[in-house]
Image: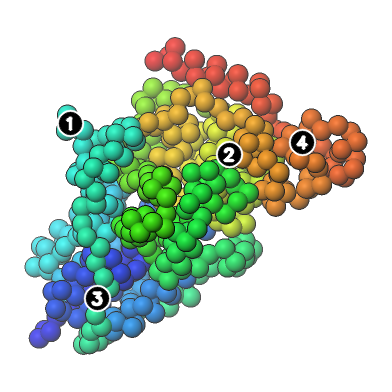
């Protein structure tokens, strides 16, 4: 073929700006064909809520690529079968992609690279997801970090390992035409029931939506981030997590924009640094995932493999439906179902309730979050669940068991968050809203609340279940 093309394989990097693989493909001078492969199998196959976000992110990506003269080809199937086939169909001389870091993803990429290079097709991969590759930061002893604070200090000391790259210039359309699936045929948007109906009011998928979310956050909320980030009743977080998860914005873009705004005086140094440390936590999670391939399914602390978990399907089902009888837990689980997202403070509360008060394995919670979060992320999801469960790297001590009543009273003091998602008890006064089972009869009557009827009684006694969790921990230690 006189003018062979290059294929850019998009995955969790659905943007044209700061996309190293796309930039390298254009720099090579060949016409570019963009490809996205929807693989419905594997541990990290896109979950239900994220499918909705993916649909609209792909629509936005296609529009951006059209403006660059780059066609977007959609295919379904196993990537190790589909990508070599697309290379053959198009007569491409090279394939480019940005790296992934879960073990099964790395194995897939290695298989494809070997297949392509064996057929004399150039195959190149790049860092488009992280500030630093997992092998670029290590302890003085040469191993990976297991504690976040020294990792954060090391990252701050050396900074990002690459420069942000602009979107490429438009190109002439490639000569070869490849058939593509119709995005609507993938049925990524739920229909029966359309449980994601409220997503449309919450999210604007795509690079433009990510940029708007970042601008809104850096314009003002970031200057109260240290305090407001813990308040689910306030708009105190960036809400960039789904954009980072599917790569409609890169961590480097967020890092650079925050640093620039801080240097210009628009952001207080303390608040900007705190926000960047949360970007670094995501980075830390990916470093953990790379160096601990079994992290999504196995505890990083080996002694937790014998932990005496309970099999309690009824309680798990009540937790997933926001029917535990504990208001802030139920509010969080209902927010998750309605919006595909949950405030981070509440994520810790609901996770602690599941794995400690109910003694249900963290892996079940991790899988539920994977299917219901628009920001489901291979590294963050597992690392955060292990942190709460006490079995991960830099994990909270096991005896740190969140009291959901006290957490609600502290971080949702007026009950606004609970009232927004648990309307059955909305008329209760502030002093009763987080523990309606302790409310006086007159308050219950005035609010029309009948515990056990209009709203469930708690499925676990908080004090007794806390003591049970501590006993289970001691049992595990004794067996070690």
Question: Given this view, does label 4 or label 2 mark the residue nearer the observer?
Answer: 4
**What's the CA distance linking mark 4 and mark 1?**
51 Å
Rendered residue at 39%/22% (across/down)? 303
Residue 413: quarter of image: top right
Q: Are marks 4 and 3 in contact (CB under 8 Å)?
A: no
Q: CA distance from mark 3 to mark 1?
A: 39 Å
Residue under pointer 4:
431
> Label 2: how many residues lie within 10 Å, few (<14), some (14-19) or many (20+)?
many
Question: Is 274 in front, or is 168?
Answer: 274
- Inter-mark Cα distance, 3 to 2: 43 Å
Using the image, determine if residue 97 lies above or below residue 296. below
Mark 4 element type: loop
| Label 3 sits on residue | 168
**Count of number-bearing discs:** 4
Tell me if 393 is positioned left or right of 135 in this view: right
Please report whichever mark, 3 or 2, sits nearer to the chain's N-terminal start: 3
Numbered mark located on residue 350 in the image: 2
Q: Residue at x 71, y 43 (%)?
A: 414
Q: State the SS at label 3.
A: loop
- The picture places residue 423, in percent across and down from the top left corner, at 76, 50
Q: Is residue 167 above or below residue 221?
A: below
- Which mark sits nearer the N-terminus, 4 or 2? 2
Which dot, 4 or 3, sits closer to the camera? 4
Q: Are marks 1 and 2 in contact (CB under 8 Å)?
A: no
Spatial separation of the CA atoms under disc 1 and disc 2: 37 Å
* Residues at circles 3 and 1 in contact by the CB criterion of under 8 Å: no
Provide the residue designation for mark 1: 140
Tell me residue 269's x, y (percent). 38, 48
At 27% across and 59% down in the image, what residue appears?
128
Which badge, 4 or 1, comes first in the chain's sequence?
A: 1
Q: Is residue 397 above or below residue 29?
A: above
């Amino acid at each position: 073929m006189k003018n062979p093309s290059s294929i850019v394989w998009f995955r969790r990097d659905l943007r044209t700006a700061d996309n190293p693989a796309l930039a390298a493909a254009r720099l090579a001078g060949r016409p570019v064909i963009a490809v996205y492969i929807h693989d419905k199998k594997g541990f990290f196959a896109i979950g239900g809520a994220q499918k909705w976000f993916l649909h609209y992110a792909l629509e936005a990506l296609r529009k951006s690529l059209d403006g660059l003269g780059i066609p977007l080809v959609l295919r379904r199937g196993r990537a190790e079968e589909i990508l070599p086939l697309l290379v053959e169909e198009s007569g491409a001389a090279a394939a480019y992609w940005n790296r992934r870091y879960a073990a099964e993803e790395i194995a897939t990429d290695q298989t494809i690279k070997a297949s392509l290079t064996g057929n004399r097709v150039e195959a190149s991969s790049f860092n488009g997801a992280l500030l630093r590759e997992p092998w670029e930061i290590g302890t003085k002893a040469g191993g990976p970090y297991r504690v976040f604070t020294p990792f954060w200090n090391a990252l701050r000391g050396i900074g990002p390992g690459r420069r942000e790259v602009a979107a490429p210039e438009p190109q002439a359309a490639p000569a070869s035409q490849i058939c593509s699936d119709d995005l609507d045929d993938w049925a990524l948007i739920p229909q029966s029931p359309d449980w994601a109906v409220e997503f449309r009011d919450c999210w604007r998928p795509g690079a433009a939506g990510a940029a708007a979310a970042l601008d809104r956050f850096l314009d003002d909320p970031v200057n109260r981030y240290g305090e407001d980030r813990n308040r689910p009743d306030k708009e105190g977080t960036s809400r960039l997590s789904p954009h980072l998860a599917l790569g409609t914005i890169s961590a480097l873009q967020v890092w650079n924009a925050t640093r620039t705004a801080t240097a210009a005086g628009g952001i207080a140094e303390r608040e900007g640094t705190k926000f960047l440390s949360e970007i670094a936590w995501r980075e830390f999670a990916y470093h953990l995932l790379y160096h601990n391939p079994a992290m999504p399914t196995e505890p990083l602390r080996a002694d937790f493999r014998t932990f005496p978990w309970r099999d309690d399907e009824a309680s798990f089902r009540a937790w997933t439906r926001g029917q535990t009888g504990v208001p802030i837990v139920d509010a969080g689980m209902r927010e998750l179902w309605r919006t595909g997202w949950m405030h981070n403070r509440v994520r810790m509360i609901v996770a602690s309730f599941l794995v400690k008060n109910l003694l249900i394995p963290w892996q079940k919670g991790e899988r539920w979050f994977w299917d219901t979060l628009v920001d489901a992320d291979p590294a963050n999801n597992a690392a955060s669940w292990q942190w709460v469960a006490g079995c991960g790297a830099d994990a909270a001590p096991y005896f740190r068991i969140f009291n959901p009543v006290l957490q609600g009273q502290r971080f949702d003091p007026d009950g606004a968050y609970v009232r927004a998602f648990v309307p059955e008890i909305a008329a209760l006064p502030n002093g009763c809203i987080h523990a309606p089972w302790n409310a006086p009869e007159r308050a219950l009557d005035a609010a029309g609340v009948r515990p056990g009827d209009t709203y469930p009684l708690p499925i676990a006694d908080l004090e007794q279940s806390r003591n049970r969790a501590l006993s289970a921990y001691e049992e595990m230690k004794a067996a070690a």
